[in-house]
Image (cartoon, coloured by chain):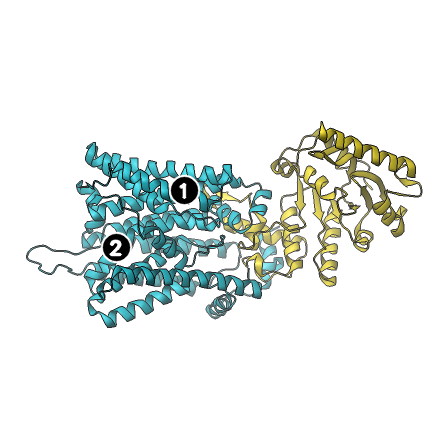
Amino acid sequence: MSTTAVKQEGPAAVVSAPTIGSHARDYWRRVRGGDIGALPAVGGLLVLCTIFSIMRPSFLTAGNFANLFTQGAAVTLIAMGLVFVLLLGEIDLSAGFASGVCAAVLANVVTVFGHPWYVAVLAAVLTGMVIGTALGFLVAKVGIPSFVVTLAGFLAFQGVVLLLMEEGRNISVRDPVLVAIANRNLPPALGWALVALAVAGFAVVQLLRYRKRAARGLVNDPLAMVLTRIGVLALVLGVAVYVLNLERSRNVLISSLKGVPIVVPVIAVLLVLWTFVLQRTSYGRHIYAVGGNKEAALRAGINVDRIRISVFVICSTMAATGGIVAASRANSVDPNTGGSNVLLYAVGAAVIGGTSLFGGKGRVLDAVLGGAVVAVIDNGMGLMGYSSGVKYVVTGVVLLLAASVDALSRRRAAATGNR
Amino acid sequence: MSATPLLELRGIDKSFGPVQVLRDVALSAYPGEVTALVGDNGAGKSTLVKCISGIYPTDAGEFVFDGRPVSINSPRDAAELGIEVVYQDLALCDNLDIVQNMFLGREKRNGIMLDEPTMEQMAAETLAGLSVRTVKSLRQHVSSLSGGQRQTVAIAKAVLWNSKLVILDEPTAALGVAQTAQVLELVRRLADNGLAVVLISHNMNDVFAVSDRIAALYLGQMVAQVRTTDITHAQVVELITAGRSGGLGLAAETGANGNGAASADRTTTEGAS
């Protein structure tokens, strides 16, 4: 059968090619049908930023903008891993202290044993993988609910951190490379170069896809839509880098402080990597399938147990990267690294971003958007002088709000037949 | 029509612990024909299908596929032979779109990347080949489809792989009148395209509307395999409910009952030992 024949006969050709208008209408219909995606996160971010900017003008400065990234980085990285676990409808409550354990391993290797930074990073990441494998094995092969396994992990890892820290000692991290991750900035020119690279890469991918689909006569987004996407990305990245490249130092004579924090490209690379894995590989497709309908995935010949174990490995490994960033930011590791609010902030970030607690729905980008919301709340309320008690309450309420939005939109979707 | 069956089962036994679900079952499916598999609830229809599709291992018996003996130990084995099953509960992922569902577990790839254009094109061709024109977009989530459309996608998924034998487990159970007619038409078209089709159904109207042969299961035993034209509606119902009808089915009433009771005793003692 030739392509032209398909073009005339195929059911796909029955519908007219979508226009920008029909895209907008489709999107609106999906939102009304309960598929709201990242809308609450983006909307919440705008509202919060507006409120804080009005209440505290210092919120809207380049210095504070840069702070947001370094403050939210660890939580965002952990949340990115949690998205994978949440996609299966599972939960990892131990991710926070898993990051603490990995940070403690990092600090011990680099400071106590004096190995170079890359050995320490490798050791931390390997620790994360081992933790994830153990959790995944207990969930998938032994059959204990993930809630219980990771709750046990939450307690046990807390103890492991204490043991590694020899009962509450604090180990400082002085390695320049490790400290640079969350405390140093890229030279402004390099920031611009990376933006150009990212936008060009995105444009090439999008346009190649457009051409390939057009050549095969498949239904395609209008070219204007594709170009708009590229334009929006260029605009967002451009503005962000412009602001981050402004001078943030209070006194330029003492030291200059400008450029994109190094942790930003780290997050960006991991975001692209995991998005690629989820959206463009069959492994990622299988994660969605297992999260959507485990039985169907099993019958399709997917190795469900392997998928389940692997998401816990990814989650704990991302927790390890979060732990490394946290250690870098604090210049030290103490028994509370990865403790207190880290885990709930991370779960909150994923859910606020639009990842469903019921499985089958979510993107890695959600973690970044939700992480931004959490960071803004934390940062803005700090600027307003609220105590950490109030901060906890507000963040808890926001997490509940996000979970209710998730649950309600799911009900709405079920009612309208969207899910 | 065709003299040699595509799939022939002989002497299939299957027990779950002490309960023997299938006893010495034989079944033949011919290319170009719809074989209806009928039986009451608990007769073992679904178990038989799961044995054929490799989900359950059989305790005894042989499979002959396309003239040669084969063993089916996993769903992949069955898929490699060209056996596809459309399950009662559909086995579609609501959160994936039509193309993603049709290729689930067997995605086309370009290196490590998914080859979406090829998959979309193949899906469109398959649906067009089945004269399906009711879906709006191949990229819409399965959750937004109607029951009939979902069944259509499930069936299209089964024929996508140049399969030779398609087994449909109660494809019309949850459908309205118009959608049922649509799906039955699709079932008939599969057979007319040269595939062997096994249709499991409770609905006698469906069975007589599309099938060429009828195979009746009664308490785990295959009591009759006849051509649809050689049997009446009432006879099939008798086969399903009593295991025999006139000269068809289990030998004699006492024999059948005695046999059944004996086997029940046997299975319980087996379980106890």
Residue in the picture at 40% in, 43% down: A314
Q: Is residue A235 above or below residue B112?
A: below
Mark 1, Cα crowd under 10 Å, few <14 / some 14-19 / many 20+, is some
The chain carrying label 1 is A
Give the label on residue A71, or none. 2
Callout in the foreground (2, 1) = 1
Tell me, by letter, which chain the rendering colours cyan. Answer: A
Is A353 situated left or right of A236 in this image? right
Corner quadrant of residue B209: bottom right
Real-space Cα separation, disc 2 to disc 1, in angstroms:
28 Å
Q: Is residue A232 above or below residue B254?
A: below
Residue in the picture at 36% in, 46% down: A95
Q: Is residue B66 above or below residue A403?
A: above
Tint applied to chain B in the drawing: yellow
Residue type at mark 1 is Ala
The chain carrying label 2 is A
Mark 2, Cα crowd under 10 Å, few <14 / some 14-19 / many 20+, is many
Question: Which sits in the foreground, A318 or A3?
Answer: A318
Residue type at mark 2 is Gln
Q: Which residue is mark 1?
A: A152
Name the spot of residue A81 as percent of width and height, x first.
38, 47
Query: Of helix, strand and loop, which one carries label 2?
Result: helix
Mark 2 / mark 1, whichever is N-terminal:
2
Name the spot of residue B18 as percent of width and height, x first.
71, 33
Give the label on residue A226, or none. none
